[in-house]
Image (tube, rainbow, N blue to C red):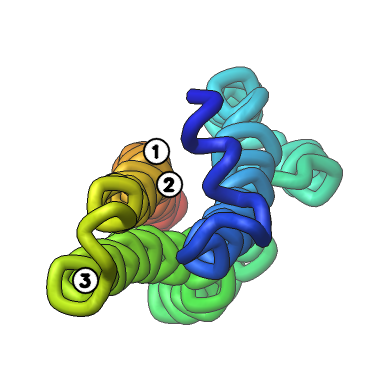
């Protein structure tokens, strides 16, 4: 670990790759934190209770109270439900159109930036590979051009550059890819739920 920390020092050859990989990781992590807050916290927390309360109001035909509940709840699925209930007097076609309009707004908000996090993970891996190639070039140059007394240190430095950048690239990419998988799973579940619950409410009000 201490050897890797030393790789960030300007005195170490290839330190530029270490800082660039770290910067890319921090950018990806920033987007990941924003997505976690939006998808897992803001768009999911309290969802089950809202659906239970909303379903009871719809079942008892308290449509105004159900609309008020949906409008007061800041969840994507609540916005879909509110649009459907508000358009209930226009028939199935109007309800479906209202549902689709809100869905087309809310679904992209759930998937926004996830692909960018994946891109940051790929860039980290590629930068690690680039650092590896640089380290190998440094090593071959040492074998060809360094005096015999300096070759051992030059070879060690070249290998350290190659392995250090590869390791940091992977340490950056793997957590980001895990987060991407979790975010994709949760966003897809929320989108499918909006489609399913919206259709059920439309059917019950038709």
Residue visible at 68% across and 64% down? 86
Tag 2 and tag 1, C-beta contact below 8 Å: yes
Where is 16 relative to 110, above or below? Answer: below
**Residue that mark 2 sits on:** 172
Disc 3 to disc 2, C-alpha distance: 18 Å
- Mark sitting earlier along the chain (3/2): 3
Cβ–Cβ under 8 Å for marks 1 and 3? no
| Foreground of the two, 30 or 62 | 30
Q: Quadrant of the C terminus?
A: bottom left
Residue at image point 21% right, 71% down: 133
Q: CA distance from mark 1 to mark 3?
A: 23 Å
Q: Residues within 10 Å of mark 2 (few under 14, many from 20)?
A: many
Mark 2 or 1: the one toward you? 2
Above or below: residue 35 compared with residue 141: above
Residue at 26% over, 66% down? 147
Tags 3 and 2 in contact by the CB under 8 Å rule?
Answer: no
Residue closest to the eye, 187 or 177:
177
Whole-angstrom CA distance, mark 2 to mark 1, is 6 Å
Q: Of label 1 and label 3, which has the lower sequence position?
A: 3
| Mark identifier at residue 133 | 3
* Residue 172 spot, x, y in % from top left: 43, 47
User: Closer to the camera: disc 3 or disc 2?
Assistant: 3
Q: Which mark is residue 109?
A: none
* Residue 196 makes an appearance in the image: no
Categorize mark 1 by other alpha carbons within 10 Å: few (<14), some (14-19), many (20+).
some
The residue beneath circle 1 is 175
Q: Is residue 150 something one can see in this rendering?
A: yes
Q: Nearer the viewer, mark 1 or mark 3?
A: 3
Relative to the observer, which residue lies in front, 46 or 86? 46
The image quadrant that residue 183 belongs to is: top left
């Amino acid at each position: 670990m201490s050897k890797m920390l030393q790789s960030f020092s300007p005195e170490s050859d290839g330190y530029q790759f270490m800082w660039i990989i770290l910067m890319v990781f921090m950018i990806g992590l920033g987007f990941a934190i924003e997505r976690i807050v939006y998808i897992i916290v803001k768009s999911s927390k309290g969802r089950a209770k809202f659906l239970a309360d909303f379903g009871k109001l719809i079942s008892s035909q308290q449509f105004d109270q159900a609309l008020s509940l949906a409008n007061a709840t800041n969840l994507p699925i609540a916005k879909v439900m509110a649009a459907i209930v508000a358009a209930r007097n226009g028939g199935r076609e109007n309800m479906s159109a209202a549902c689709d309009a809100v869905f087309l707004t809310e679904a992209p908000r759930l998937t926004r930036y996830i692909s960018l996090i994946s891109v940051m993970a790929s860039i980290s891996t590629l930068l690690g590979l680039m650092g590896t190639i640089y380290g190998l070039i440094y090593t071959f140059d040492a074998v060809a051009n360094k005096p015999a007394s300096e070759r051992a240190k030059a070879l060690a430095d070249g290998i350290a550059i190659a392995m250090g950048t590869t390791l940091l690239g992977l340490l950056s990419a793997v957590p980001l890819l895990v987060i991407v998988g979790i975010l994709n799973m949760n966003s897809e579940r929320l989108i499918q739920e909006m489609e399913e619950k919206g259709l059920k409410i439309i059917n019950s009000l038709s």
